[in-house]
Amino acid sequence: MSNAPHCVNEFVNSAGLVGLVGHKLLLCINRRFEMPPPLIYRPLREKLEQLREQSLISSKPEPLAEKKCPKIVDEYTTLIRNWQDQATPIQRLRLFTIDELIRLANLSGRFRDHASHRYTGEALRRCGFKQKRDWSVAGRNKRFWLFDGEAQ
């Protein structure tokens, strides 16, 4: 910016100089505005932290009333014990195959039509049954369950 009065309509604001030059008048005022540096990183970080916390809070599943599904073995155990209570002492003394016990106790599978042999076996052990095997030729090595009376 020249200091000559003949400069017309010159306006400079870049280096802290604010000036308006008229026809024969130079008005040049040297003003420096003390401005803090732009706060870019700190508010951005704070905003990111705030958004992160909000997303974590909103993504946490609120604990619903949890449905405690009873275990399959526990269901089978109660059904077998109900059947045992209804059976006579003489009926309890005979040998049963696992398929007979499933039908007698009305066990049904949770995911399929038929009950699981694994869970049925575990429930039978809890109810005091012992596993026996018929090693004779006529028995064809079948497994049977015998009520022992000592429930675990």
Image (cartoon, helix red, strand yellow):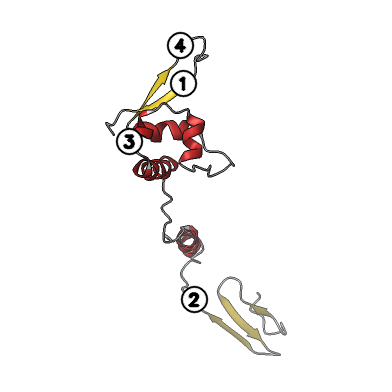
Which residue is depicted at the point 72% across and 85% down? Answer: 8
Identify the mark nearer the N-term, 2 or 4. 2
Q: Quadrant of the N terminus?
A: bottom right
The residue lying toward the viewer, choosing from 62 and 98, is: 98
Q: Determine crowd level at label 4: few under 14, some 14-19, many 20+ residues with C-alpha closer than 10 A.
A: few
Q: Position of residue 130 (x, y in %)?
A: 36, 25
Give the labeled residue for mark 1.
Answer: 143
Identify the mark nearer the N-term, 4 or 3. 3
Give the labeled residue for mark 4.
Answer: 135
| C-alpha gap between disc 2 and disc 4 | 104 Å
Which residue is depicted at the point 48% across and 62% down? Answer: 58
Q: Are marks 4 and 3 in contact (CB under 8 Å)?
A: no
| C-alpha gap between disc 2 and disc 1 | 97 Å
Q: The disc labelled 1 sits on which kind of residue?
A: Arg
Give the labeled residue for mark 2.
Answer: 33
Q: The disc labelled 3 sits on which kind of residue?
A: Pro
Q: Quadrant of the C terminus?
A: top left
Question: Is residue 5 positioned above or below 38 on the image?
Answer: below
- Which of the 4 image quarters holds residue 151? top left
Q: Position of residue 21 (x, y in %)?
A: 66, 85
